[in-house]
Amino acid sequence: MFTVELVTYKGVYKTITAQSINLPTPEGRRGILPNHMPIMLPLTIGVVSIMEENGRKRYTCSEGVFYFENNKGTLLADSIEDVDAIDINRAKAAEAKARERIKNSDNDLDIDKAQIALLKAINRIKAKESDY
């Protein structure tokens, strides 16, 4: 077992005792088990799967970083959300709004922000509707 802290810019979202963690990285999914060597991984928008004492839990995360050393993992991301707490209707509304912003914007910065919002909304919907 090891400790994992899920942290956003607002502070510690949750501290977990884990048996394993599976993370979305640019190179694909990476798994971490107890006593893993020290490692720092970049994270992509995706789903983090953690085998906790009471079973597997899933969390969506935005881009970020995961650091592991001495049986302590720290996941830093702009946003983290428990998949069980996702409101699917709200996520679908956010997807539609982001698509509309992309379609109607002529400002590159607005389009970039809308594309990130779209990716996050799609991630939330897929996480809620699937079991990966």
Image (spheres, rainbow, N blue to C red):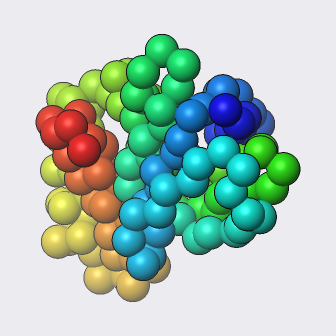
Question: On screen, 80 above or below 61?
Answer: above
The image quarter containing residue 89 is: top left
Depth check: give the residue in front, 77 or 49.
49
The count of marks equals 0
Residue farthest to the top, as pictured = 54
**Residue ID at (68%, 57%):** 36
Q: Is 108 left, or right, of 91 in this rendering? A: right
Residue 8 placed where, x, y %? 67, 44
Quadrant in which the N terminus is drawn? top right
Camera sees residue 74:
no
Q: Is 14 left, or right, of 22 in this rendering? A: right
Quadrant in which the C terminus is drawn? top left
Q: Is 34 left, or right, of 125 in this rendering? A: right
Residue 105 placed where, x, y %? 28, 74
Residue 49 placed where, x, y %? 43, 41
The image quarter containing residue 94 is: top left
Residue 123 placed where, x, y %? 29, 51
Depth check: give the residue in front, 44 or 70.
70
**Residue ID at (17%, 71%):** 103
Depth check: give the residue in front, 81 or 35.
35
Q: Is 53 left, or right, of 93 in this rendering? A: right
Residue farthest to the right, as pictured = 70
**Residue ID at (39%, 84%):** 108
Camera sees residue 103:
yes
**Residue ID at (38%, 48%):** 47
